[in-house]
Image (cartoon, rainbow, N blue to C red):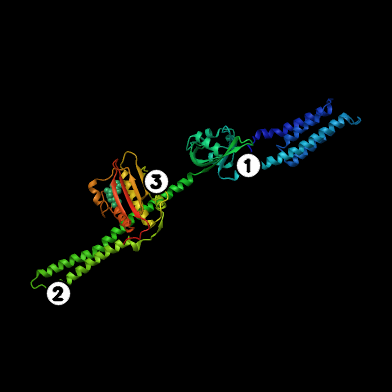
């Protein structure tokens, strides 16, 4: 990788080379010494590769040769062939060989510079630092991400300049880099204007031929944007989960209320009418009979409605398919992330490896996990100590898999245990008391069982166990 050259020293070099060439010519042409002074032109040729292109170097070389011959002509033209001519020939040969080598160096330098320029095309911030973390290369991406131009960044110690905050100790990272030649992780850097930026950083160690580390190439990608996008996605998903939960419960409640209310109201009306008929003298029994028959029909309608509602979450409404419970649990996590974040809840996943697939409805089982998870988060909202939510999967026995949702909340009063899963049972001012009821109905539809228990240390465990590959129950 090519360090950038300081512009000021590059501007002086042509002048220095010119002065050098003039001095060499004057000494060669007008001072009587018996050495091949013109050999020194090789320094001018070497200097020229830094500010001339290939043609320019050839021109400088030709110029130096011409000056060599001119100086020889000035001082020794009339002399017979001898030492002076030999010195002139040696000088010309030295200039020619140096020119040849210099052009080779220039070509490879140019190739390296082109490669370095390629790094400028990258939108990532790329820089190279030596063994002492001193920056030797700084691409355009780094200039625009951090705000320091290359001229200022080169020569600075990278971690001091960027005030790097590492995810692990610097020594550990260095150890890993030395061992594997590569390191990857998220770092927080500080820009020139003092603002912070989180980058996904990839380091590659460059070694010399003997295997000694010489430099580190660091590629940094700004992930704040990505993080923001992920956060708003999680927010949207959580919103959706919340909405679907509320709307499922809302719909269910509304349809129960609507569909059952109608026949119930009819039963009451007909009951009252029948009572009225019976109250008069010589009651019209046929009318009373008709009223009672209609009451029975209405009651049957009401129980039909209830049956249909149950069917909603039973066989007919289910989409059974082979299912990896761990995967289903992991997919449900983003739906709870926002609530967990808002209440500072830490999540621990303890998923058993090698669990066999079960047969189940992915969405409904995820709804159970989300219901239990959100209940746990809400229960911990008032807790002062650590708020920890643990979701475990484990083999229950030969034929069952268990999912447990554990929290470090206040738990519940033991007297409530019998009612927790009843529809409309809630202890929350804004609760509906449907979450656990729906969860139980979904689990039982899968042929499983759900239960709640209290932890000795405080907190509740809600767990359900599902049979392996058992047909859904109606
Ligand atoms: P709700 O929407 O009212 O919370 P649920 O059916 O989800 O309805 O829960 C019923 C009740 O069970 C809650 O009001 C609460 O009293 C209790 N409960 C549920 N989960 C927990 C938990 N993790 N810790 C303590 N109590 C809980």
**Residue 206, how many percent across, how many down?**
60, 38
Mark 1 and mark 2: Cα distance apart in space? 102 Å
Q: Residues within 10 Å of mark 2 (few under 14, many from 20)?
A: few
Instruction: Say which residue label 2 marks.
Output: 286
Q: Residues within 10 Å of mark 1 (few under 14, many from 20)?
A: some
Closer to us: 107 or 435: 435
**Residue 131, how many percent across, how many down?**
58, 33
Give left or right: position of 293 versus 421: left
Q: Is residue 80 above or below residue 416?
A: above
Q: Is residue 45 above or below residue 429?
A: above
Q: Residues within 10 Å of mark 3 (few under 14, many from 20)?
A: some
Instruction: Say which residue label 3 marks.
Output: 349
Q: Is residue 347 above or below residue 305?
A: above
**Residue 102, how many percent across, how many down?**
74, 37
For residue 41, say whether it is visible. Answer: yes
Dot 3 lies on which element?
strand
**Residue 336, how many percent across, how many down?**
38, 49
Q: Are marks 3 and 1 in contact (CB under 8 Å)?
A: no
Instruction: Say which residue label 1 marks.
Output: 116
> Quadrant of residue 25 in the image?
top right
For residue 428, say whether it is visible. Answer: no
Specify which label sits upstream in the sequence, 3 or 2: 2
Dot 1 lies on which element?
helix
Residue at point 24%, 64% (across, down): 303
Dot 2 lies on which element?
helix
Closer to us: 153 or 116: 116
């Amino acid at each position: 990788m090519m360090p950038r050259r300081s512009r000021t020293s590059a501007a002086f070099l042509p002048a220095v080379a010119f002065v050098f060439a003039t001095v060499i010519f004057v000494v060669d042409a007008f001072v009587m010494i018996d050495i091949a002074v013109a050999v020194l032109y090789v320094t001018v040729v070497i200097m020229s590769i830094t500010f001339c292109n290939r043609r320019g170097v050839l021109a400088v070389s030709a110029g130096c040769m011409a000056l060599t011959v001119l100086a020889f002509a000035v001082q020794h033209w009339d002399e017979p062939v001898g030492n002076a001519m030999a010195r002139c020939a040696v000088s010309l040969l030295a200039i020619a060989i140096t020119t040849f080598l210099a052009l080779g160096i220039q070509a490879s330098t140019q190739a390296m510079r082109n490669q370095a320029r390629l790094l400028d095309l990258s939108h990532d911030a790329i820089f190279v630092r030596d063994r002492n973390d001193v920056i030797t290369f700084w691409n355009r991406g780094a200039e625009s991400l951090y705000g320091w131009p290359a001229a200022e960044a080169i020569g600075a110690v990278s971690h001091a300049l960027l005030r790097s905050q590492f995810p692990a100790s610097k020594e550990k990272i260095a150890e890993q880099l030395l061992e594997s030649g590569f390191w990857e992780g998220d770092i927080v850097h500080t820009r020139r204007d003092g603002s912070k930026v989180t980058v996904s950083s990839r380091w590659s160690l460059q070694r010399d031929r003997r295997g000694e580390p010489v430099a580190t190439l660091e590629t940094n990608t700004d992930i704040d944007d990505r993080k923001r996008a992920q956060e708003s996605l999680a927010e949207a998903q959580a919103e959706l989960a919340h909405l679907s939960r509320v709307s499922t419960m809302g719909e269910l409640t509304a349809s129960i209320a609507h569909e059952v209310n109608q026949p119930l109201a009819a039963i009451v009306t007909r009951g009252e009418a029948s009572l009225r008929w019976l109250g008069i003298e010589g009651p019209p029994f046929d009318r009373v009979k008709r009223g009672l028959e209609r009451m029975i029909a209405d009651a049957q309608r009401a129980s039909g409605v209830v049956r249909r509602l149950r069917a909603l979450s039973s066989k007919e409404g289910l989409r059974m398919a082979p299912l990896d419970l761990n995967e289903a649990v992991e997919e449900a996590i983003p739906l709870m992330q926002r609530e967990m974040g808002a209440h500072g809840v830490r999540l621990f996943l303890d998923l058993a490896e090698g669990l066999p697939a079960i047969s189940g409805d992915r969405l409904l089982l995820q709804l159970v996990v989300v219901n239990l998870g959100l209940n746990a988060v809400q229960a911990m909202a008032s807790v002062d100590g650590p708020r920890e939510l643990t979701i475990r999967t484990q083999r229950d026995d030969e034929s069952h898999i268990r999912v447990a949702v554990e929290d470090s909340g206040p738990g519940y009063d033991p007297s409530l245990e019998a009612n927790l899963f009843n529809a409309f049972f809630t202890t929350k001012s804004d609760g509906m008391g449907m979450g656990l009821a729906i969860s139980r109905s979904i689990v039982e539809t899968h042929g499983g069982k759900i239960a709640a228990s209290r932890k000795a240390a405080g907190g509740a465990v809600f767990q359900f166990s599902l049979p392996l590959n058992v047909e859904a129950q109606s």
